[in-house]
Amino acid sequence: MEPSLELGMPQKERAREGERRYSDISELPGVGPATVERLREIGCSTIEALATATVAELEAAGIGEKRALELIDLARKSIEISWVTAKELASLKSNVRHLTTGSKALDSLLGGGIETQAITEFFGEFGSGKSQICHQLAVNVQLPYERGGLEGAALYIDTENTFRIERIEQMAKHLGLDFDSVAEKIIYAEAYNSDHQILLLEKADRIIKEHNVKLVIIDSLTAHFRSEYIGREMLAERQQKLNKHMHRLLRLSRAFNLAAVVTNQVMARPDEFFSFNAVSPVGGHIVGHTSHMRIFIRKTAGKNVRIVRLVSSPHLPEGEVLIKITENGIEDAEEAEVKSR
């Protein structure tokens, strides 16, 4: 059987050869109100979410395997998911943008800032500044492109009650932004347990589309899972849920070209007490393999100064820089010192 789309065919020609493109799940042929409601219940409220869903997820909503394959195929054609050459991939990757952290040194370490279409993980001990970075990013994402922003809103899932609107106000004021306007574009939800956290993300696609969300933050990713799934006998179930949760986040980041940022707790490693690896992030290989950038933050002897180390990346070398957390937000350590004099 001949493929409907030739490998190497230009994207514009593919669009002409393809059938109708759908912008909403209610437009799909044979999809009535009952099916739309079932799809929304499993987090497929948009064409983008349906295109990146699995057959098993649709079967859980009472849709047969054959019908599920048809719906997913129609959704994927609508958002141009297809085989491409490496040359075309390079062109598609030009859509990837970078969000500034507020620190030039850290942006440089990360190849320009926090990358869209990928998950960036910050891990470190309590009080190391993970949530401070999240606050800063929630403000920075609203900046224009020329200032390192993404000209969009932020979706903030808080699992440890660490979000403070006062910090948002301080950071917005420092950047010369109107606080009310900034606060309006941070869409916040507190997750009360791991199931609630999973549900919030599953229902996020419509909010992302309607509010032009360009940054999704989960602070912290593992807190609820760590406290609820205790003991080795519950480890497998915990890891399976974390895996599905992380992949849902990754699919959203790719479907909507947004930046995804998670924070993670650490656990002590007594056998490595005097080395850099004295602590390790929670979540094991599941979180490690799904996070594209893993960044370790640790305190120093200097006041409010942090060492930020890029631990792993698919295309960047390891390295570390110094940043400072001030009343203004995240800054380069050297610049912050000059301002304080």
Image: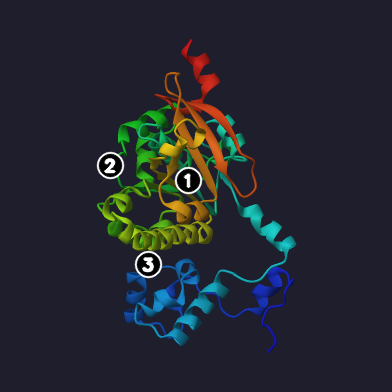
Compared with 337, 289 (above or below) is: below
Which residue occupies the foreground of this view, 220 or 240?
Answer: 240
Q: Nearer the viewer, mark 2 or mark 3?
A: 2
Task: Please tell me in which quadrant of the rendered image residue 202 appears.
Answer: bottom left
Rendered image quadrant of residue 205? bottom left
Gap in angstroms between the C-alphas marked 1 and 2: 19 Å
Give SS at disc 3: loop
Label 1 sits on residue: 121
Quickly name the residue at label 2: 161
Residue 67, relative to residue 214: is it above or below? below
Residue at the farthest front position: 271
Badge 3: residue crowd in 10 Å (few <14, some 14–19, many ≥20): many
**Label 1 crowding class (10 Å Cα cut-off): few <14, some 14-19, many 20+?**
many
Percent x, y for residue 103? 53, 30
Query: Mark 1: which amino acid?
Result: Glu
| Numbered tag placed on residue 43 in the rendering | 3
Viewer-nearest of labels 1 and 2?
1
Residue plotted at (45% across, 18% down): 302
Which element type, helix, strand or loop, lies under badge 1?
strand
Is residue 139 in sight in this rendering? no
Q: How far is mark 1 from mark 3, CA to CA?
A: 24 Å
The quarter of the picture where residue 201 lies is bottom left
Residue in view at x 50 percent, y 83 percent: 70
